[in-house]
Image: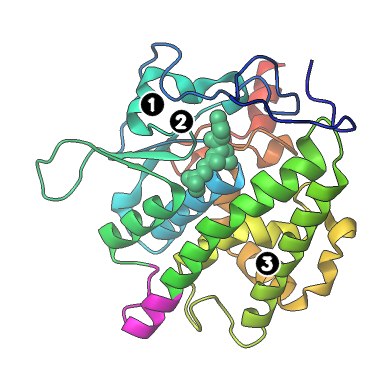
Amino acid sequence: MPADASAEYTPPKIWTWNKPSGGRFDNINRPVAGATHEKELPVGKHPLQLYSLGTPNGVKVTVMLEELLAAGHSGAEYDAWLIRIQEGEQFGSGFVEANPNSKIPALIDRDPEPQGSPPRRVFESGSILLYLSGKFGAFLPEDPAGRTEALNWLFWQMGSAPYLGGGFGHFYAYAPVKIEYAIDRFAMEAKRQLDVLDRHLAGHEYFAGDEYSIADMAIWPWYGALAKGRVYDAGEFLQVHEYEHVNRWSELIAARPAVRRGRMVNRTMGDPAGQLHERHDAGDFETKTQDKIEAAAA
Ligand SMILES: N[C@@H](CCC(=O)N[C@@H](CS)C(=O)NCC(=O)O)C(=O)O
């Protein structure tokens, strides 16, 4: 039986994994790391192999790859493979080799510098963004002040989003019981974070100033979506329309063609026309979306 939040709980001396935790991720949560089964990762034709899912952390990377391609960096061609985390695919042996933390996204660069090096794994979405930005010399300001500011906000996102996702989202939307203390604690933090962003964006077009950068790509899938009420169905609860500068910036980013494409890759929810489960070629956006695959199968 999952825990009963209405009952007083006295933690035992030693915690043991003796019951399901309940909630949306009950079937995949475990207190140990490592692989649960043998499964090699598939490898496609491009130098960059992405193993991911269209969640906010996954979207950061597909947006970056589509932006690089749109900017003319043809070396950023990539195969995007789907990892279905609800089915435990992040615990396959091949994925664990790519990311010992068993979380999407994970990238394998099969053509890393210096030339002739063995394939290189890159995990943690912030590390992947920085890696790609360094590899192609793009989307990070060159001047020290702009670069530092972009990195400030990139690392802000990596440290802050767990309070939004693992904190607010978990207790508001996914936990098996509604705990007022936990929801209050994290709703307050989610609103405070939105206010941090709103105050900054009141005086800046993008996070690093005038230049669109990996900081915007990291922050937008979480907070850009939150400001539009698309995260945890919490728009009204958090009164997200009040953050007018975040809303302005969210629309600016959403209108970018590469962002529209990046959002579709590895997406398994919503309108089938907006879902491209796997991406192996630029033409896949025209021919391999779920609406077309389902129509062809019917
Ligand atoms: N800090 C990591 C977080 C990645 C993460 O939390 N990924 C989630 C999906 S958004 C995941 O793979 N969860 C599977 C699991 O926890 O087993 C990053 O930014 O890459």
Q: Is residue 189 left or right of residue 233?
A: left
Position of residue 245 measured from the top left corner of the image (x, y, whole percent): 72, 78
Q: Tell me what residue is drawn at x 39 percent, y 58 percent.
A: 68
Decide which of 244, 164 is in the foreground and name it.
Answer: 164
Q: Tell me what residue is drawn at x 38 percent, y 52 percent.
A: 127
Position of residue 87 measured from the top left corner of the image (x, y, whole percent): 60, 19
Q: Tell me what residue is drawn at x 64 percent, y 65 percent.
A: 255
Q: CA distance from mark 1 to mark 2?
A: 6 Å
Q: Earlier in the sequence, mark 2 or mark 3?
A: 2
**Disc number at residue 263?**
none
Q: Which residue is mark 3?
A: 193
Please tell me how crowded label 1 is: few (under 14), some (14-19), or many (20+) other residues with Cα within 10 Å: many
Q: Viewer-nearest of labels 3 and 1?
A: 3
In the rendered structure, which amino acid carries the disc numbered 3? Gln
Q: Disc 3 beta carbon < 8 A from ligand 1?
A: no
In the rendered structure, which amino acid carries the disc numbered 1? Val
Position of residue 177 measured from the top left corner of the image (x, y, whole percent): 85, 33
Q: Secondary structure at mark 1?
A: helix
Q: Earlier in the sequence, mark 1 or mark 2?
A: 1
In the rendered structure, which amino acid carries the disc numbered 2? Ser
Badge 1 vs badge 2, beta-carbon distance below 8 Å: yes
Q: Is residue 131 left or right of residue 182?
A: left
Q: Earlier in the sequence, mark 3 or mark 1?
A: 1
View extreme (front): residue:
13
Q: Which residue is mark 1?
A: 96
* Vertical side of 93 occupied by 245: above or below: below
Position of residue 5 measured from the top left corner of the image (x, y, whole percent): 85, 32
Q: Tell me what residue is drawn at x 73 percent, y 41 percent.
A: 170
